Image (cartoon, rainbow, N blue to C red):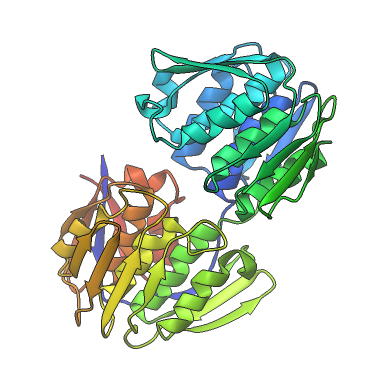
């Protein structure tokens, strides 16, 4: 098991190119299950732990995959996909594996998918997927930790989400591609990653309209064709590096990510005193001597992304006043606050709101990553802290960040990976 050793209090300076978006690559890879003939070639696929888990799931279902992690190119042949069951031993590693439900149902007429992490339906986000598929005419049963859905073909219909769900939106798009009639998704997720998935499907022959808006229409088609497609840059990784420039008072340029994907984040960076300059496919941020306090409420796109909440909280820890962060997307996403306190942060949490009283400086300590995005926020705090920090459980971070320590080192950070 690895750890990061970080000597903090050094400015980040330089330019860095972001890899392809994990949150777009995963559903696009699963979406290739809909292509029954030929080889799909996907470019800009980042070599992350979640990508390798996805390959295992796809191969279990019968797909043949080759992946050049240096060139970040994946070739998928799904002609021999006949397996309709995704087992728990694979699903438990990654919640996004539930995105196999829509493609397998549309392709084979029946899908048996383990509930990710062994969760029960209840109020879990998979409810959106289940209700949506039932609306399209699928018979769905939950038993023994598995969801079994049947319907060949689905009839289409109008699916309404009580709140936007990007994986729910993607699963319904997948399921509806071969339906008998049109499908309408109301209150659909507007995330750039959803647009990327729709663009991939449309290039392959689907007829999806309105992606990026709350109202999506899917006209049914008979089949999809194999194509080459390049995944868009990861806005969450880009945001992490930009916030790294902000917290260290340095100047960081990220390339490979459209500024329109981070508009609210850039607005908040300006609020805390950063200088922000944008071009068509690059963003430059220069951090202030000391950040100003900020108020942030996470919200589905185009709101402030919940996946960058821990990073902006890290910046708030050394702000010149009191910041307020409200989390509206996930019930329990303040696990990083305890670790930030170990670094000397002054944070109090009540329900879904965190109040952060800025301190002049943080001090290095032993901390741990509890999930991908919490880990990224903790690493940023350690970069700004005085002294040496050790970050444990970095395998969580590796799920969403490709060689984070090497990328940060290229910007001037003193960070190295060691065995714990």
Residue at x 76%, y 42% (from the top left corner): 217
Residue toward you, 165 or 229: 165
**x and y, in percent, of residue 370 in the image:** 28, 47
Q: In this view, does 361 lie above or below 213?
A: below
Location of residue 357 by image quarter:
bottom left
**x and y, in percent, of residue 396 in the image:** 34, 44
**x and y, in percent, of residue 163 in the image:** 52, 48
* Residue 269 seen from this side: yes
Residue at x 37%, y 25% (from the top left corner): 120
Q: Is residue 293 above or below residue 333?
A: below
Which quadrant is home to the N terminus?
Answer: top left
* Side (left or right) of 403 relative to 153: left
Location of residue 99 by image quarter:
top right
Residue at x 52%, y 43% (from the top left corner): 47
Which quadrant is home to the C terminus?
Answer: top left
Residue toward you, 216 or 47: 216
Location of residue 364 by image quarter:
bottom left
């Amino acid at each position: 098991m690895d750890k990061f050793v970080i000597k903090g209090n050094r400015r980040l300076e330089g330019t860095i190119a972001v890899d392809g978006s994990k949150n777009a690559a995963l559903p696009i890879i699963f979406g290739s299950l809909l292509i029954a003939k030929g080889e799909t070639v996907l470019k800009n696929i980042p070599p992350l732990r979640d990508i390798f888990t996805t390959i295992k799931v796809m191969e279990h279902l019968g797909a043949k995959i080759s992946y050049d992690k240096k060139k970040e190119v994946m070739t998928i042949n799904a002609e021999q996909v006949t397996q309709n069951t995704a087992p728990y031993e694979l699903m438990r590693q990654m919640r996004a594996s539930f995105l196999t439900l829509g493609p397998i149902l549309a392709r084979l007429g029946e899908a048996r998918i383990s509930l990710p992490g062994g969760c029960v339906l209840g109020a879990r986000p998979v409810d959106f997927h289940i209700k949506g598929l039932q609306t399209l005419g699928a018979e769905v049963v939950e038993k023994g930790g598995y969801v079994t859905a049947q319907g060949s073909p689905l009839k289409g219909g109008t699916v309404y989400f009580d709140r936007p769900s990007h994986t729910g939106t993607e699963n319904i798009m997948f399921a509806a591609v071969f339906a008998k009639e049109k499908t309408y998704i109301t209150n659909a997720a507007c995330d750039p990653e959803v647009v990327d998935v729709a663009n991939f499907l449309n290039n392959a022959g689907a007829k999806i309209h309105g992606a990026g808006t709350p109202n999506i229409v899917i006209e049914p088609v008979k089949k999809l064709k194999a194509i080459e497609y390049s995944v868009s840059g990861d806005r969450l990784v880009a945001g992490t590096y930009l916030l790294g420039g902000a917290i260290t008072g340095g100047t960081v340029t990220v390339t490979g990510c459209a500024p329109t994907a981070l508009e609210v984040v850039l607005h908040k960076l300006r609020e805390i005193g950063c200088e922000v300059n944008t071009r068509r496919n690059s963003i430059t941020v220069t951090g202030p001597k000391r950040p100003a306090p900020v108020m942030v409420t996470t919200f589905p796109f185009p709101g402030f992304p919940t996946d960058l909440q821990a990073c902006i909280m890290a910046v708030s820890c050394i702000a010149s006043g009191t910041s307020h962060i409200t989390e509206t997307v996930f019930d329990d996403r303040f696990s990083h606050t305890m670790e930030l306190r170990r670094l000397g942060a002054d944070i109090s949490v009540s329900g879904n709101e965190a109040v952060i009283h800025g301190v002049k400086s943080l001090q290095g300590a032993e901390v741990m990553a509890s999930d991908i995005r919490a880990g990224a926020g903790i690493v940023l705090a350690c970069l700004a802290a005085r002294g040496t920090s050790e970050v444990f459980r970095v395998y969580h971070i590796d799920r969403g960040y490709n060689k984070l320590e090497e990328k940060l080192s290229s910007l001037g950070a003193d960070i190295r990976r060691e065995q714990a």
